[in-house]
Image (spheres, coloured by chain):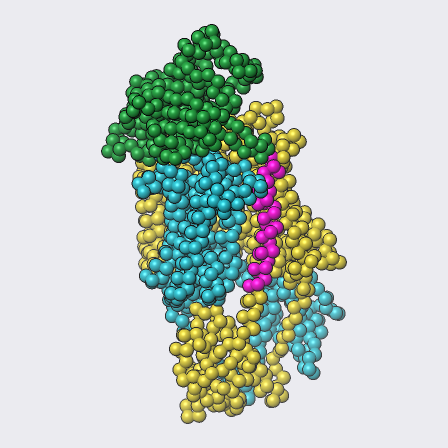
Amino acid sequence: MEIEETQSPITVKELCKVFQDEGRGKLVAVSNVTFDCRAGEIFGLLGTNGAGKTTTLRMLSTLLKPTSGSARIMGHGVDKNAQDVRKSIGYLSTTTALYPRLSCRETLDFFARINGYPENKIENRVNHLVDRFGLTEYADARIERLSTGMKQKVAIARTVAHDPAVVILDEPTNGLDILNVLDFHKLMQELQEAGKTVLFSTHTMSEAEKLCDRIAVIHRGKILACGTLDELREQSSQRYLEDIFVWILDQHGEDPDAALETM
Amino acid sequence: MRSILVLTRRELKSAFRESSVVLYSVLLPLLLYPFLLWLMVTAMTFIEGQEEKRVYRVGYQADMERGRHADFLSRLRMDDRVELEALEGELPSKLIGHHVLLFEKEEDGEKILGVNYVGDRPESTQAHRHLKELEREFNDTERKKWLESQGYMAESARPFLLTGQSTAASGDVGGYLLGALLPIGLLVMIALGGAYPAIDTTAGERERGTWETLQSCAPSLSTILISKYLFVSLVCCLSGVLNLFAMLVSIRSIVAPLLRENESITFTVGPQTLVVLLAGVVGVSFFVAAALMLCSIFARTFREGQALTTPMFMVIALPVLPLSDPSLQLNTKLAFVPLVNLALVWRQALQGEFHLVYILQTLGVLTAMVSLALWVGSRLLRNEALMTGGLEMDWKRFTGVVKGVFRGN
Amino acid sequence: MNRIILRYELLGLLRDTRTIFLSVLLPVILLPVLLFTLNKFGQRATGDLDQTYHFGRVFPSPGLEVVTVSALDPNEFREMLVEDGEEMLKEGHLDLLIRLKKDEESDKQLGRDVASLYPDIGEMVERTDPARPVVELLYRSDRERSMRAYFKATDQMLDFREQRVKQLLADNNADIGVKLVAEDISTPQERAARQYGPALSAFMILMLLGGGSVAALDSLAGERERGTLSTLFVSSIGRPTIAWSKFCAVAIISVAVALVQILNLAGYAIFGFVDWPLQSGQGGVWGFVALFLLFSVEAIFTAALLLHISARSSSFKEAQLFFFPTFLVSFALSLSGLMPAFESASVVSLIPVTGPGVLIPEILAGRLDPLILALQCAVHLLAAYGLMKATIALMQREDFLGGQAPQHGKELVFEQFSQRALPFFALLCAALFVVPSNFAALSTLKGQGLFNQLVLFVLCPYLFLKFYGQKVRTAVPVKRVDLRIVLACLALIPLGQLAATGLSHLVGPLLPAPVKALEMMMELLDLENTPHWQLFFLIGILPGICEEFAFRGVLLHSLHKRFGPWALAFVVAVVFGFFHVNFFRVLPTAYLGFFMALLTLATGSVLPAMLVHIGNNSFAVWAMLNNMDFEGLPTYVYVVGFVGQLVLTGLVIKWGRGYPGTRWFKGDRSESSS
């Protein structure tokens, strides 16, 4: 898919999400979040547990409707053109799973098909993905029989099965061993080289440091800082991302110890 | 449309790799009726075997040996299945150690034999029946002897013979039996066949996490739900068709033990009847699928889904009760009762009767029910919390959702 | 049992308000609907019985009106004169058609005698060509009303005939015959007990299984799926304690659900909405105590049963798979009270669920036998204990929490083949019942030979093997065996025959073979018209080869990795037994099948089993043709047969190489199949 250079693939403006909870009343999960992702960029959303990362990503993937604000992906509004948005993205989170009784090949074929990949190219695409992700030996094995690591590989493969312009990943390396994590990093670079925009959330500082072109720090539903690693280092006069994170929280009157406990 | 087909195909592929679906929708219809047959044959053979060997213990007043009924007592003594025991004095008021008690009494100046038995004990009732048979045989013999002594033919003890014959064609009787048995079985088995897929495709997917995976893909939520609905309806249809087939193939074997030897029955289903049956299967499948999915859509896990669909399953099975009366016929009032009307249309079709008015009425009611279910479903689609992950259900939330359906938000 | 686990289990269950609603409240709400509907349709049925039936009397039929007027109750039957009437009967305008015929077999003297003895009935006798009259009742067996009219009219006409004959005797002062007047001395309580007893038993099982099922099935299977079971297993509490605690939780829930339903029912009885047999003053209180005891032990048993199902399942959904047939079977057994031949003072009381089905009507009737009650309670408790021991044994296995290496390739295919074998054979059994009854040609001896033996027992299993890529030579090994084993098998033929006959004698009182069933079997064999060589071939040789191919070949091979040798022989024997249809044949056939399976497992070849099977069947044919009867032999002969069978089979197990892939295999492990 072609990406227009004049328009950011992801534009988020004052996005808010308020939940109504019987016990706790109104819960502001995301408040006035604003950022954009440029084409071919790996953008990291960094925050503690409960910071609002997942909610933000779920709104961008159209699973949740924003309470207010706007978000556009590839020029399509998440609230008004949800279907077009979903055609343009590949979304993976810890809560998305695979169909246990389909084989790897069938899974990739299925997701490519329903996301509108050209039918005459699907077979080649599936073979390429099977190759790329080292699934050849297990291509015809059912998902239920694979190990956790293999399942995650298949999950990532199906996310990009239809070659989306934007890839949204929510804590994608959760549960992966070191080799698979390295392979994942390599995949991120490949996607970037292919001109894809990657937005992913993590609470692993080292991963964000290594992969991201730009990082947004989110805490209690608000973006506290956004920029390249160098820019954040300059701002905070800290070298490591963990220290930068603590400094940002401190600047905004948050208790870093309490925040760190939840990471 | 393409997305719907792709999604439905995927659902079917996954479902038939799941042993539960194969069991309930395929194996169960094919195995249930032969199993019932075996059970029935076994039970009847067992009872027959027991009864053949049973010896009835008959207690009688000792005085009877010197009375008018001494000959009858001798006749009883000769019977292999009667064990007599003379009782001195007054007979006990309860049957303990005997199946029946025999005693002489007077009625309208006539000395007759009284038989006490206990109706709630099968062996006592059987003993009574056996004695009645022996009474008939004995009287017959005595009468014949007397008539011969008077110079008449012995057979004149029966002044006329009584015969009975059914003029119903063998196909009509078959249709009657099919009409009595098939509708109930079909309704229950379609619901059973559809319950598991309905729960699994909603609550089950949520539990496995594939619900969100699918929602994050290109097809819209309504496309996804339509394909799921289509899938559940197809499985219900399959279950119905297989049941229909299994029932038609097994029915002869099932009723054969119950028939008298000289009764012949054919079970043929004409093309018109088949059309009505299959159309009904399709209609009720769509209704059952909608009803079950409407319940399971609220659940977050398979277990919750099962808990929520159980009442609906009971409601679907409730029409079975009145249908157990084989004489129940369709009329204008009953034609408005969902499921009962369809079952009765089936019954009539199997008996070779086709009342277009009732069929159209039934179709109308079924369409209205399916439309209502789909309308409610489309309203529920607007509830974000429900669509994303089900609801932690309590009455307040539930009533909130129901109000939302009618308010359209 | 650990109180902490019990408490938390109960807490978890009670917090699931939805399940509580569905297991407890919903049946309470549904019960009046059920009772109302049953009542309504009961009234409707009774109402129909009071209806007037329309019958047509074919005109002219001189004298017939005397009979119809005298015999039939004018309040129940309304007469119409018709010329033909068959069309009207067909259309439903008439319920019954009555016409006059002649008894073709009677001679004229009989006609004259009837006319002379019974002047009124004699009107029906034609003077010029006298014969005994036949009153013919025509009805429609495809209409309920018509059938009822027919039965009612028949009863009334027979009564009338009887009265006429008695009148004749009385007029001639002939004091012959007897008159039996019966009186049902059962109390209303006893009658009501008969009506409610079976329903109550079935209702309780429904509530116990339904109420406890979600809790029990989730307790192990569901927790295993969620991962919380492994968390519990790594705590300081041992697995047996965990099992007993869960059992107690499930049992408490089941009993609570059952109690609520009984109280609900009792409420309806007390307020008179339901005629309840157990009244106070007639052992009412003790009756309720007895019922509660019985329900409690049933609850304990069902809790253990459900927990065992849960332990065998890897997920909640899989547990549901096992639950449904269990539920069906239990429900069927609970209806045992409907079977007239079942008594509580019999072996029925030794079967869980079945015993209460028979005992409950007796308790309701006020005939409480404390000994039988105690026996049934003991049976249920013992069965529950046995199930719990089995559950604990399962839970202590290393692979209980999963974690086995995933199978692929040949291993995976064999696993699928193995899992589908029993359902496949179930389908074959269904075909065995159903197909011949739809094709008359297939229910003859030759038809059975062709269809059952060649199609069902050879072709279908062969295709099943091919579908899963299994080698026929591996599944049905026909290896040569030691001469000693051959001789032992030959000796087993008559010994087995004797032992099986002895077994039939032993179980005869419990599982009697009705004369009619035996006659039907002899009819099928048609000994007089079937050439002897055909009998030997169709009954002796063909089944000996084909059935062994299917059962000790394909079936045994498919299951040999799932069961140990003894259990495997038992399972194969039971399946083999069920294929023999009549229940009185199931046991002796399964018995012989067990030994044949042992021979296969001992030798690693189906040839010994084939030899014994062919020999056994041929021997039976020879005995039939020569009118040899093994039924009346002295008991010691059967004992000798049994002991001989045991000894010889033991020797074969000792001498044989064993079946590859089982514990009995003595050869090189690399020879093992798959």
Residue that appears at 65% across and 47% down: C260
Q: Drawn colour of chain B?
A: cyan
Where on the picture, by quarter, is residue B74? bottom right
Could you tell me residue C269's position as x and y percent?
67, 57
- Image chain in green: A
Q: Could you tell whether C309 is left or right of B91 in the image?
A: left
Q: Quadrant of the N terminus of chain C?
A: top right
Please indicate, yes or no, whether residue A250 appears anywhere in the rendered image: yes
Where residue C265 appears, as percent x and y from the top left, is 65, 53
Q: Which residues are magenta?
A: C12-41
Percent from the top left, x then y, of residue B39? 48, 54
Q: Is residue C289 above or below residue C321?
A: below
Q: Quadrant of the C terminus of chain C?
A: top left
Residue B35 to residue B344: above or below:
above
For residue B89: magenta? no
Q: What residue is at 47 percent from the left and 44 percent from the top?
A: B408
Q: Quadrant of residue C382?
A: top right
State the residue in front, C386 or A136: A136
In the image, B160 versus C520, the foreground residue is: B160
**Chain C, which colour?**
yellow
